[in-house]
Image (cartoon, coloured by chain):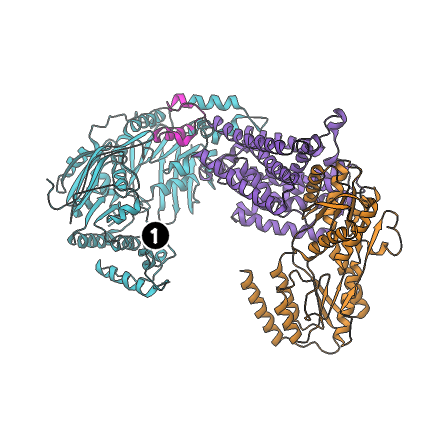
Chain colours: A orange, B cyan, C purple
Amino acid sequence: MAANRRHFVMALALALGLSGTVPAADQRTFIPLIARGFQHQFWQSVKKGAEQAAQDYKVTISFEAPEAEWMVDKQIDMLAAGLARRPGAIGLAATDSQAVIPLLRKAKAAKVPVVAFDSGVSGDLTATTVMTDNAAAAGLAADKLAALLGDAGDVLLLAHDQVSTTGVLRRDGFLDQMRKAHPKIRVIEVQYAADPLKAAEVARAMVQAHPRAKGLFCTNEATALGAGKAMKEIRKSGLVVVGFDSGKGQKDLINEGVMAGAITQNPVGIGYKTVEAAVKLSRGEGVPKVIDTGYFWYDKSSMRDPRIAPLLYD
Amino acid sequence: MQPMDVLLSASGLDKAFPGVVALRDARFELRAGEVHALMGENGAGKSTLVKILAGVHRRDAGEVLLAGQAVDIDGPAEAQALGISIIHQELQLMPHLTAAQNVFIGREPSRFGWLDERRLNRDAAELFQRIHLDIDPTTPVGTMTVARQQMVEIAKALSRASRVLVMDEPTSALNDLEIAELFKVIDKLRSEGVGIIYISHRMDEIQRIADRITVMRDGGTVGTMPASTPLPQVIALMVGRELAATRSPVPDSSDAAPALEVKGLSRGRLVRDVSFAVKRGEIVAFAGLMGAGRTEVMRTLFGADRAESGEIFVHGKQIRVRGPVDAVAAGIGYLPEDRKHHGLATGMDVESNITLPSLSRCLRAGLLIDRQACAEMATRFVERLRIRTPSNHQIARLLSGGNQQKVVIAKWLARECDVLIFDEPTRGIDVGAKAEIYSLLAALAAEGRAIIVVSSELPEILQLGHRILVMCEGRIAGELPGEHATQETIMALATAWH
Amino acid sequence: MALMQKGRQQLLAFGSLAALVMVFGFLRPDTFLTTENLIGILQATTVTGVLGIAATFVIVTSGIDLSIGVLMTFTAVMAGLFLARLGWPLSVGIPATLLMGAAAGCTSGLVITRLRVAPFIATLGMMMVLKGLSLIITGARPIYFSEVEGYEDISTGSMLGQWLPGLPVPNGVVIYLLVALVASLLLNRTALGRYAQALGSNEEAVRLSGIDVGRWKVIIYALGGGVCAIAGLLGSSRLNSAQPALGQGYELEAISAVVIGGTSLAGGSGTILGSVIGAFIMSVLVNGLRIMSVADEWQLLLTGIIIIIAVYVDRLRQT
């Protein structure tokens, strides 16, 4: 069913591509951005950055994403439709870096440059990748957590899922860094939760099962919010919680002292740099192979720092 | 020693269902190349017998010989393998499939794993040819007339090389021409040596088509006789007793406004310009053949189906019936023909069923059920109607047919309805409970209620009705006073369509 | 007889629950059987438990409501709109939220009865509509209740704990059990409950008894919607935020709880107590497996098997 629809859309896209009108020279360059999600705060910030860049560079963008991150086929439909509109360039945060390859080949053949953002696609089908180095960012979380624990003790890991690129990279980046740089810290359990309510239950059960655990790392906003709320409910003290991304709920928890701090990416920067790179590519200018938009540790004291504050969203 | 041409013989058949003994030492014999009519009142055991032969029910005791061999018919598939096919009253065809697809359903010819649609149609065409049937095998069955569908059903049975063919009321939905066509096919099958068991209520037909008649009564076989046996003799055997004259006293004729008056009620083909009135204390019986529109009139009158036109008056006051809600509010109660599907919430207990239409009368603060009031109401009617149940909290499904029917009656009495419509009140109920329901109806009429009885059983109509209205093709074909009507006069009106 | 049957059904469910608690208590006596963890299980049950109660009413009529998970989200968003954005006081905002839930349920009911769309499809459509509305209203961003005084306490505060310091049961759990009690009364002791069961048993018989089937169905779906709104308040209070992306999938958990509790999807019979026990069985199972550090994917697999076994055992009991 999904496959059929995909074929249909691809056929439709081809038909449109053949018969569609070529944008006139004075028309604005069109750059579709196809993300992995839009319901998450993070993506809203990416979108904000992209819109800012579109304004600065006077191009038209669209920002689309499937309802859920696992809807690989829907994303492919969107990519096909985007391609069919003869864009100047395309921005893509692939849900499945393998599944998009046929369409990326088509893009390459049609000389439409593709900018990967937030997560990369292996090979040379994309011109550049604009992203946070998720593994290194999670490694920074590991360093910070280790420092807060005096470099010893048992810690827990609550990841947002076991299949998505960011979920896997952040989990493994955290585990690797602990193993390499902090041998006295043991990560005793890894669990997963997809939404904040579930994260609250999972965090409670983990802490219950391991009363001696001293630290907890949550790999995204939803898990951090849920776990933080759960720790607040049971008035758990002596457990250091470190999160990822921001959002008002997480920021409140950090301000209240329930969480020690979190890693923030630069989502607005990702959006901005993606459009910027796409514009340059559409004009035939060169861009570096990887554009790292950076990541930062923040806590209660540094939250209002002028270098940090703009990166945090509510 | 069995005579050579005996195809099937059954003897000593017993079958009991919870609450009802359906067969008691039943016998039956079918010869090859014979049309053998099975007759009896409803509940006499005809369909149970036939269902045992078709593997739908398992017998409790007795033996069945097929061509001299004892057989154990375990299920419908086994019956078909033995060459016994049954054509049910409700046809078992898939309306969206073609005639050919229906005939060969489950046994589609295939080639290299693909359906061989061409061979399917060719085989079906041959089969239709064999019974002189002019049907395009590729026509979807749903677009055919009922008569044609029935022919497809017969072809389906023949395609399985049936030796025994059971036809349950095959003509109930057919007109005269179609019946003639069906009889031609039956003749053809007879000449090929197929044994046909023919169930029907229509005496004229049986005398036309059948070779022998077996009469059943109360689950047993009364006797087998040639089809030429005079009708009154057959009926006497079927009824088996003088029905007790429990007719209620003649209603008060001085009552000015009738309890119920219907004028010009119409809906579709089966309710055409129907007008009648029922007085307080009167039982009006509706007779007619199946498909004459009796049930449809009642459903329309009650609002279960929407009337296209017509006026309804209750005690002289016109009411608007947009749904059963309005009819019930006006004091009309309806006991549907299909008790299990329409009359009872079978998964609920006796008390909940009895109080269902009157629940709003035993509430406290308009919301909470007053359990004591409910229990009292239920107990009152359980006692009054002598409903045999272990308690008021017995699940309705577990009661016998007669007691289920009494629960439905209780439901309307509790609602204080004074116009009561009984659609086939004794269907599937055994003889003892029947008599009880007859006297109950008489008593209800004597209390001043207006009662309508729809029945397919002529003795029932004759016994209960003060007046008898006979329907034919959606119209009231005539009216007979109860005390002067006979089965013959009723049948004459019921079949007056040609 | 009927009462005995119902009683037996609940006894079976309750026995399974007790057995589960004993097994986990035996395997992990020091971590599973602690007041804190048991309260955690109670807390974890509140949202799906309340949704299970909403689902019970609809399922008893032999209907189904797939929109309840998202309906919970939608009402949480409405609460955010009323309380956080518009700044209405709790005494106005909460009833308004409950009304919104009832209105959404009522809409489903009307689509089912007036437009004669099958409940499965009608509520599937409603699910998408409500999800879309939630995202539109919030701009796909959570609404936080940080400025709403006392909102967080609705679910996580403990009035009981103030009176009985040894028993810090969160308000959310108390509210859940109160909702269950009222729902049980509604289902067993009122005309609404009786009609709901009769509808599930034989809708045509109810119609031919002169009861306005359409009206009662709409009322039942509206009631279900109102109960979902309670779940919406509890969930958003716990997170102190209305999360517009959350909710889908919760309807299936709730329906599973109802089914484990012995309510038949064919309608006609069902008890609130059964659904409450079913919800607890689900959360005890998940909590116990987590305490034993069983991986997520195995938890899912085991939960699925338990649901199938529970329904199979229930079938055996019925035949």
* Residues shaded magenta: B381-410
Residue at horizontal 38 percent and vertical 49 percent from the top: B268
- The outermost residue toward the bottom is A25
**Image spot of residue B147 (x, y percent):** 29, 53
Residue B211, placed above or below residue C198: below
Up/down of A118 relative to B312, above or below: below
**Image quarter in which the N terminus of chain B is found:** top left
Q: Amino acid at mark 1?
A: Leu
**Residue C146 in view in this figure:** yes
Q: Chain of mark 1?
A: B
Determine which quarter of the picture holds residue B271.
Answer: top left
Asked if one can make out residue C96 in the rendered structure from this viewpoint, the answer is no
Spot occupied by residue A221 in the image (x, y as percentages of width and height): 74, 50
Residue appearing at x 73%, y 61% in the figure: A118
Task: Please check the rendered image and state whether residue B405 is part of the magenta-colored stretch, yes or no.
Answer: yes
Q: Quadrant of residue B388?
A: top left
Look at mark 1 in the image and give the residue it sits on: B93
Q: Residue at x 19, y 54 (%)?
A: B184
Residue A105: within the magenta? no
Q: Secondary structure at mark 1?
A: loop
User: Whole-percent x and y of residue B57?
Assistant: 30, 39
